[in-house]
Amino acid sequence: MNALKIKTLAILLLYVTLANAQNIDSLFVNMPDNINPVLNKMNRKEMLSNVKLLRNDSTLNVFMKYSKLLKYDSLENHIRIRNSALSTFEMKKFRTENGVELIGVIRTFGDTIKSSNITFYNTNWTVNQLQFQMPEASNWLDKNGLSNSTLDITWAENQLLTSFIALNFIDKGLKIEAKNNTYYYLSDETKKTLKPFLTDKIMKYVYADKKWVKADE
């Protein structure tokens, strides 16, 4: 594909998604630097400019290292960035059932043992009181399997008191997925004992009736 065609496609994309793109772009570019200190306003502008012009998806951050734009979806108002090898930043704008627009921000840290936190903001970047109850690692235990074994359930739950849960926004709709990484934190002996009773499924949560609830299996 020649340069003229690439430029034409980029321009068409901008026109098609203008309304939503301007919204998510503005929120991202103009957010306070302390929301994601790795990228300043100039970095954020450069990152969006690059993706719109189909150029490099990596941008030099404030630490003179490269951050990479992993997802830019103007229709779903969804952005995900790998700040560094050990951290990602994710934001998604959504509208509640009563018409209030909010921004969800997920910050994830770690390599194999990833763990996330999540905060909700109003569109002026003040903190909103909406909460997401982080699932506990013990939620991934196969309680039925444990009850039919000789392993003590209380002992198993106690091994998972420290949880490492990674979150992501799902592209479509108001949904969050949660992955349990606590297994990688356990000692080799405990891993061997608990492995038959720990599921590796991704748990999903949906926004309904002004709160986040676990989706039906």
Image: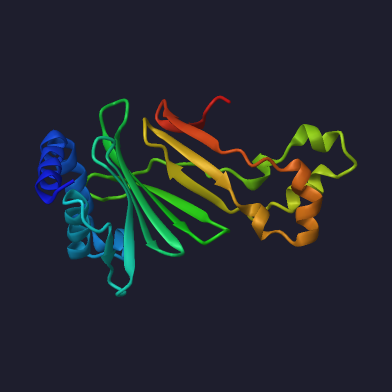
- Write down the quadrant of residue 113 in the picture: bottom right
Residue 121 on image: x %, y %:
31, 46
Name the residue rendered at 27%, 72% in the picture.
62
Residue 110 on image: x %, y %:
51, 61
Q: Is residue 86 visible?
A: yes
Residue 43 on image: x %, y %:
22, 64
From this viewpoint, which residue is outermost toward the right? 150
**150 sits left or right of 195 in the view:** right
165 or 121, which lies in front? 165
Name the residue rendered at 18%, 46% in the picture.
1
144 or 102, which lies in front? 144
Residue 16 on image: x %, y %:
14, 34
**215 sits left or right of 51 in the view:** right
1 or 131, which lies in front? 1
Name the residue rendered at 81%, 51% in the picture.
193
Identify the colour scheme used: rainbow
- In the picture, which quadrant includes the C terminus? top right
Name the residue rendered at 74%, 37% in the picture.
142
Q: Is residue 30 visible?
A: no
From this viewpoint, which residue is outermost toward the front? 2
**140 sits left or right of 122 in the view:** right
Please count the marks in the image.
Answer: 0
